[in-house]
Amino acid sequence: MGSPPEPGRGELTDLLNRCWMTHDGMWFYHCFQEFGIEKANYLNKAAIKYRLSRWFDSLGVKYRLSPPVERCLMLAGNPCSCDFEFIFP
């Protein structure tokens, strides 16, 4: 019995997108079930900001947060709110 064929780049991209969307949707759904829609939206916005900063870091995109954020603002009872300012050479 041979090995299954290697997926092409498009197939792999599609699979990763579907897996990510499933994970993200289930995460939001369970936050909604546990905490309600307002808290789920609040947590989702914080997660999006975290994800964006990680993606920008991995791509080498220069940016700063305004106001500067050094740790999760929600842990101190503050809203997760900031703007991304991009730095171009």
Image (cartoon, rainbow, N blue to C red):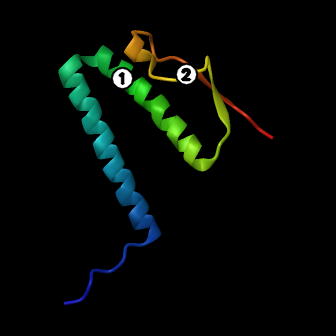
Amino acid type of the residue that numbered disc 2 sits on in the rendered structure: Val
2 up-or-down from 21: above or below: below
The first of marks 1 and 2 along the sequence is 1
Where, quadrant-wise, is the N terminus in this rendering?
bottom left
Q: Which residue position holds label 1?
A: 43
List x then y, in percent, for residue 69. Answer: 55, 21
- Crowd rating for badge 2 (residues with CA inside 10 Å; few <14, some 14–19, many 20+): few
Question: Taking 4 as reference, is 89 left or right?
Answer: right
39 up-or-down from 85: above or below: above
Image point 66% across, 33% down: which residue? 63
List x then y, in percent, for residue 10. Answer: 45, 65
Judge by depth and name the residue closer to the eye, 14 or 56: 56
Question: Taking 56 as reference, is 46 left or right?
Answer: left
List x then y, in percent, for residue 40. Answer: 31, 21
Judge by depth and name the residue closer to the eye, 81 or 29: 81
Q: Quadrant of residue 72?
A: top left
Image point 53% across, 43% down: which residue? 55
59 up-or-down from 11: above or below: above
Mark 2 secondary-structure assignment: loop
Which of labels 1 and 2 is toward the front?
2
Question: Taking 38 as reference, is 47 left or right?
Answer: right
List x then y, in percent, for residue 87. Answer: 73, 34
Residue extending farthest front = 70
Where, quadrant-wise, is the C terminus in this rendering?
top right
Image point 43% across, 24% down: which residue? 45
- Crowd rating for badge 1 (residues with CA inside 10 Å; few <14, some 14–19, many 20+): some
Q: Quadrant of residue 25?
A: top left
Residue extending farthest right = 89
Q: Which residue position holds label 2?
A: 69
